[in-house]
Image: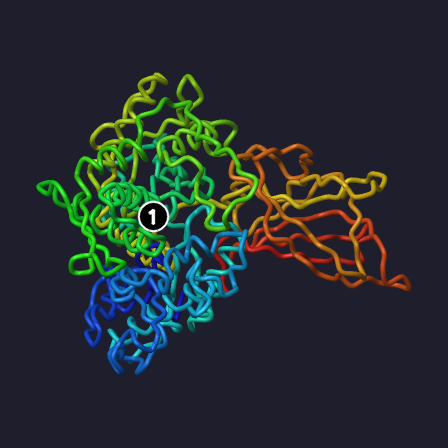
Amino acid sequence: MSAARYVVGIDLGTTNCAIASIDLAAESAPIELDTISQLVNPGEVAEGTLLPSFLYLPDAKDFPPGSTRLPWQEAPDAVVGELARRRGAERPGRLVASAKSWLCHSGVDRTGPILPWGSGEDTPRVSPLDASARYLEHLARAWEHRHGGQVRLSEQDVLVTVPASFDEAARELTLRAAAEAGLPAVRLLEEPQAAFYAWLDHLGDRWRDRVRIGDLVLVCDVGGGTTDFSLIAVSEVEGALALTRVAVGDHILLGGDNMDLALARLAQQRLEKAGHRVDPMQLQALWLQCRAAKEHLFEDPALDLQPVTLLGRGSKLVGGTITGDVLREDLERVIVEGFFPRVPADAEPARQRRVGLQELGLPYAADPAVTKQLARFLMRQAADAPGLEAIRRGKGGLAAPTHVLFNGGVMKAPALRARVLDTLNDWLTDQGCPVIAEDGVLEAPDLDRAVARGAAAYGRARLRDGVRIRGGSPRTYYIGIESAMPAVPGLDAPLKALCVVPFGMEEGTETIIPAREFGLVVGEPAEFRFLSSTVRKQDAPGALIEDWGDDLEEQEPLAVTLEGQGTAAEQVVPVRLEAKVTEVGTLELWCVSRNGSQRWKLELNIRERDR
């Protein structure tokens, strides 16, 4: 049992952050959404249950002296939250946005000062890691302020959520950001699971009346920056209903940011057609304004349009501003039809033709159709997935969900939820499966804050033996094996992938790689390359894969010098391999010498872990 007074869930979102907590001193205390003090105007601090995930880097002329003071900090060098979003709409070159998306982008230096991306040389910059740490630090200080400064968040049982599709490097950087924010011992929880825990907590014991053995729940999570899909199966263990996460989708950079930009491009075309040139900085501001316009139109069906206003360039503009409109019909054409088209179950996302030279930036999904991404996920996850053997499939091979749980700010829009459900039911009908009925939609209590609520609910369930979603490893893991081939000038030896952790391998279990020996380089620096897959669920430990196409993705390599023994410092030692997934989600790969006298350990974080 934890000695902490509170269990605290933090949703570190792409667009908004939230925090929820439970007082463990009370036996049946409810989950409380904690308010977050933040600047909303210069010199004005207010409280809200969401902290916009924006960091503004001001210059000396931006705010009057003392106007950025916070209850716990006299003169911060940057602004976080609502005021950052508002001022950033006017000066986008000084605004850090989508730091979470940058944190999982392996093509850039995620610990280097690269944000705001594309800003001028005179603008201060921070890393995605630093921006994430600042959000977490603000949440921590605001939580402590709300509790009168009598308790420290670092002494509580804290869970931070991440996309289920985050790779190990992004998970590790999230933990590092938490440590830099003064939270060195947080746990990580997948966001779709957190959303499901929020639903479980909302219903209490009544959740057992909504699902039955054999059901398959699709968690459709479309947030500000990412689209996440998970499948949770309902089964029976010792006479009781049990929940198992049986599938996790790929990491897809596709969400509200893409939709807002699409609207901004449309508004830009209209303004330029009217004779107003929109430069890159104005487009950034238009992007942020279209986000607010989209939300207003989806929230209020009575509105036909929402104005957007830009600061103009040049002396001929009346009042120095440019005004345009986002129309309701724009939402239907651009968002509903563009991002959620009705497509067949076998639809595949388009692969964008590559140009020889490209501008560096976030690797957004080439195809903006969320429904195509969902079709691909359900078709790929149907075959040979442990835990899906007894789950119904359509005649075309589609994994056929019986229920759907929506999550993420984008899915607040009734029109988008209806479109996804209609498309799913089209597929199920074509595949000869029953459709998802009205009671098959599992209503989350609050899509903006469900993940924070669910993280707190999971923390309580973990401490008090409540309902848990079983899952094990969310991916199949491999280690790279260099082929034994003659050296060829200018070419590296081909890499094979050896399966060391099968999909779903539970924490606290271990396996021996059967009947194979490999050569381990000791006594000199060596690079160990790990790979993973969310698709190849049938591979068993010891399977050696030579041609994997797009099924595997490589993790950041581990560079290490393993100590040798004897007179030869540098040598290749014959070893057999043993793999263990610890209780805190660390993959331990043991290399054991032929006679068993030496053992070397390589570690990789693959699940939530204590730091």
Of all residues, the one furthest to the left in this rendering is 302
Residue at the disc numbered 1 = 257
Near-viewer residue (363 or 283): 283
Q: Residue at x 50, y 48 (%)?
A: 359
Q: Residue at x 39, y 73 (%)?
A: 155
The mark total stands at 1
Measured as percent of width and height from the top left, residue 547 is found at 66, 32
Q: Is residue 586 visible?
A: yes
Q: Is residue 205 visible?
A: no
Q: Specify the quadrant of the image occupied by residue 488.
A: top right
Question: Label 1 sits on what residue type?
Answer: Asp
Colour scheme shown: rainbow
Classify the position of the N terminus by image quarter: bottom left
Q: Residue at x 35, y 30 (%)?
A: 401
Residue neighbourhood size for the residue with mark 1, other residues' Cα within 10 Å, grouped as few (<14), some (14–19), many (≥20):
many
Could you tell whether 24 is left or right of 543 in the image? Answer: left
The vertical placement of 141 against 198, above or below, is below
Could you tell whether 249 is left or right of 214 in the image? Answer: right
Q: Secondary structure at mark 1?
A: helix
Measured as percent of width and height from the top left, residue 73 is found at 31, 80
Of all residues, the one furthest to the right in this rendering is 567
Q: Residue at x 80, y 48 (%)?
A: 519
Could you tell whether 568 is left or right of 56 in the image? Answer: right
The vertical placement of 604 against 345, above or below, is below
Measured as percent of width and height from the top left, residue 461 is found at 35, 55
Of all residues, the one furthest to the front in this rendering is 316
Q: Specify the quadrant of the image occupied by residue 263.
A: top left
Q: Specify the quadrant of the image occupied by residue 115.
A: bottom left
Near-viewer residue (105 or 58): 58
Near-viewer residue (592 or 403): 403
Measured as percent of width and height from the top left, residue 207 is found at 26, 42
Near-viewer residue (127 or 407): 127
